């Protein structure tokens, strides 16, 4: 126990967490030189393509310290984007300390501060590391002052390194040994282990990542899941080095993996406590906080025959991503699918990509929405996550939209532009703090304004130097309306929005401009109408394709031409009654981006 150290690397996105993990693995000899590659712990193709960490990954290493002793180091590399904050929280539960990584060219950013506060609340040991000191734009003195002013940590407690070159990484390892506490459990106590991650393997079944808080777990042991009271035999167990390695025992304080032939996917969940069947513990380990989705959207298979496969895929993916929410949904436009909840737009994009790549599905996604609180005339409170579920106006007493508390960290020179952006997004300033050149802005902004394009606009006007962290705060009464699309007087149920009444005119004109360029001309006129509270705000008519039926008439009686034109007119009218409007897949994809 004295020679075990469990820690996570946490930081804002793109501050070098995965690269630092590579150097630690290299120094500790986790892999041979020929096996080393960049971002070794980013195992998914999506992670390599997008250059971000999506799933937290653990690795068990051995490090010989300068005092001559050999230590077991359990390292967990975590995501940096706010949409994957749930991964960070679960990872911290298996640790006694964190490396809080800060880019010495960028300084402290919003997610850095959020991760620091999480670590403080969980009473973890914190080591501040300034990374990328090899770059010409690195400013150690400036960032050290920020650390002191914002986090209250003195310069002499900061470790500087370059995770790319390996400079200073040995000093970090020595600080891990000296500053991070050993695990608090006892190998002699009754077995208590918490499941911190799960995934489905086609050959092994469900694989669980566990952290042993008390006791010892051996190969072949009979275990009990305290939450579900199900009993299983341990078939395989091991560690990651970072390669998967089988072993015969996991002791108190270690993080490892197990397989135990679970047949039903719903029998086990992240946060469950494992104990011994023969000599069970009496108390559960604390569960993880249930995280609520911030964004909702409908996901539908383009091929209706894939519905069952889609359902199984969601069940398996839910194992690996406990923050995903889904429930069945039926649409007249798309057929059977699921209403899914996500932590943000990036999380939504990643889930869709994983479903399509890992399970060979072809999916279409509807426009994202947030959850609204409604007080009905009967004084009953209901929550809706789909604009189509919004009751009629005469049944609503109060419609309340979710408000997020936003923490924006920005250099002084961008302050005016950012305040202007926040006002445009209906934001209310709560606080402003000055830290030399850095400014912290606290705003309350409607969640619906944040999820669409707020982050992109913030990065654009600040040249990438401003950062954002936000969390749901409360519901507020607001003048919101539903916007529907009618094509030839038929509503498209899959495309509706709930927006603020002040923005309806501009919004409706933009939607018409988008739609008219997306729908190809048909053999009959197509009427596009934007409906707001039963009133048509904007409309446009796509003219029909017409053949010149009188081109063969050279002179003669005018009645012949009139008969041909009337016949064409009657045919077009009949076609409109029985014809279907062809909507290409791009139609929905572009509207989503809009």
Image (cartoon, rainbow, N blue to C red):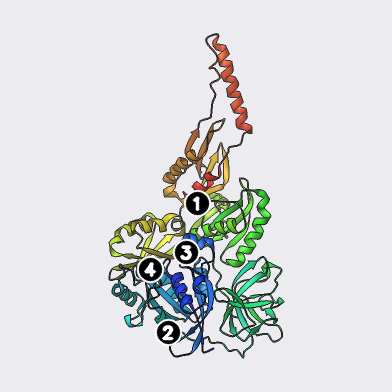
- The part of the image, by quadrant, that contains residue 434 is bottom left
The furthest residue to the front: 34
Would residue 459 appear left or right of 334 to someone viewing this image? left
The furthest residue to the top: 556
Question: Residue 567 location, x and y as percent?
Answer: 60, 20
Decide if residue 352 is in sight here: yes
Would residue 316 appear left or right of 589 to someone viewing this image? right
Q: Secondary structure at mark 1?
A: strand
N-term mark: 4 or 3? 3
N-term mark: 4 or 2? 4
N-term mark: 2 or 1? 2
Residue 384, above or below 292: above
Would residue 258 appear left or right of 451 to someone viewing this image? right
Q: Secondary structure at mark 2?
A: helix
Decide if residue 385 is in sight here: no
Identify the residue position indicated by label 4 in the image: 109
Q: Residues within 10 Å of mark 3 (few under 14, many from 20)?
A: some
Q: Mark 2 against mark 1, which lies toward the viewer?
A: 2
Q: Could you give the CA–CA distance between mark 4 and mark 2, rounded to whole angstroms? A: 26 Å
Identify the residue position indicated by label 2 in the image: 174
Q: Could you give the CA–CA distance between mark 2 and mark 1, rounded to whole angstroms? A: 54 Å
- The part of the image, by quadrant, that contains residue 571 is top right
Q: Residues within 10 Å of mark 1 (few under 14, many from 20)?
A: many
Q: Residues within 10 Å of mark 4 (few under 14, many from 20)?
A: many
Q: Could you give the CA–CA distance between mark 3 and mark 2, rounded to whole angstroms? A: 27 Å
Question: Residue 271 location, x and y as percent?
Answer: 59, 74
Identify the residue position indicated by label 3 in the image: 52
N-term mark: 1 or 3? 3
């Amino acid at each position: 126990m004295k020679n075990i150290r469990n820690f996570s690397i946490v930081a804002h996105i793109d501050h070098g967490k995965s690269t630092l993990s590579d150097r630690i693995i290299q120094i500790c000899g986790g892999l041979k030189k020929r096996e080393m590659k960049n971002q070794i712990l980013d195992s998914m193709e999506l992670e390599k393509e997008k250059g971000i960490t999506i799933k937290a990954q653990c690795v068990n290493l051995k490090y010989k310290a300068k005092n001559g002793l050999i230590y077991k180091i359990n390292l967990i590399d975590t995501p940096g984007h706010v949409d994957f904050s749930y991964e960070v929280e679960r990872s911290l539960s298996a640790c006694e300390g964190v490396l809080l990584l800060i880019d010495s060219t960028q300084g402290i950013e919003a997610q850095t501060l959020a991760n620091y506060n999480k670590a403080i609340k969980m009473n973890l040991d914190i080591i501040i590391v300034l990374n990328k000191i090899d770059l010409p734009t690195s400013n150690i003195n400036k960032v050290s002052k920020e650390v002191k002013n914002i986090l209250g940590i003195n310069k002499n407690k900061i470790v500087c390194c370059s995770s790319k070159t390996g400079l200073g990484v040995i000093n970090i390892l020595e600080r891990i040994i000296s500053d991070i506490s050993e695990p608090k459990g006892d190998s002699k106590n009754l077995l208590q282990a918490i499941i911190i991650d799960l995934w489905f393997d086609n050959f092994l079944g469900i694989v669980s990542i566990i952290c042993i808080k008390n006791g010892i777990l051996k190969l072949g042991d009979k275990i009990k899941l305290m939450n579900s009271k199900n009993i299983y035999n341990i078939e395989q167990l091991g560690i990651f080095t970072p390669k998967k390695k089988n072993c015969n025992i996991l002791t108190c304080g270690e993080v490892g993996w197990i397989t135990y032939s679970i047949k039903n996917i719903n029998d086990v969940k992240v946060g469950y406590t494992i104990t011994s069947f023969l000599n069970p513990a009496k108390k559960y380990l604390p569960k993880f906080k249930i995280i609520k989705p911030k964004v909702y959207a409908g996901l539908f298979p383009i091929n209706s025959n894939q519905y069952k496969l889609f359902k199984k895929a969601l069940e398996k993916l839910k194992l690996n991503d406990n923050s995903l929410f889904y429930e069945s949904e039926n649409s007249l436009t798309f057929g059977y699918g699921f209403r899914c909840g996500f932590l943000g737009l990036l999380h939504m994009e990643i889930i869709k990509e994983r479903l399509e790549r890992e399970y060979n599905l072809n999916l279409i996604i509807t426009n994202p929405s947030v959850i609204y609180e409604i007080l009905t005339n009967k004084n009953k409170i209901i929550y809706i996550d789909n604009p189509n579920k919004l009751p009629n106006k005469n049944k609503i007493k109060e419609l309340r939209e979710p408000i997020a508390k936003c923490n924006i960290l920005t250099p002084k020179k961008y302050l005016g532009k950012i305040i202007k952006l926040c006002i445009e997004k209906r934001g209310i300033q709560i606080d402003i703090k000055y830290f030399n050149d850095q400014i912290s802005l606290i705003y309350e902004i409607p969640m619906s304004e944040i999820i669409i394009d707020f982050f992109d606009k913030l990065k654009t006007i600040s040249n990438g130097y401003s950062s954002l962290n936000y969390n749901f705060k409360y519901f507020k009464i607001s003048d919101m309306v539903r916007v529907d699309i009618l094509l030839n007087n038929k509503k498209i149920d899959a495309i509706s929005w709930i927006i603020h009444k002040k923005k309806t005119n501009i919004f409706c004109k933009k939607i018409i401009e988008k739609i008219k360029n997306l729908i190809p001309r048909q053999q009959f006129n197509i009427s596009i109408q934007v409906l707001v509270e039963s009133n048509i705000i904007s409309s446009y008519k796509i003219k029909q394709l017409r053949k010149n039926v009188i081109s063969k008439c050279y002179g003669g009686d005018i009645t012949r031409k009139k008969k041909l034109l009337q016949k064409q007119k009657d045919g077009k009218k009949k076609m409109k009654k029985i014809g279907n409007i062809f909507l290409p897949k791009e139609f929905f994809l572009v509207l989503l981006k809009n």
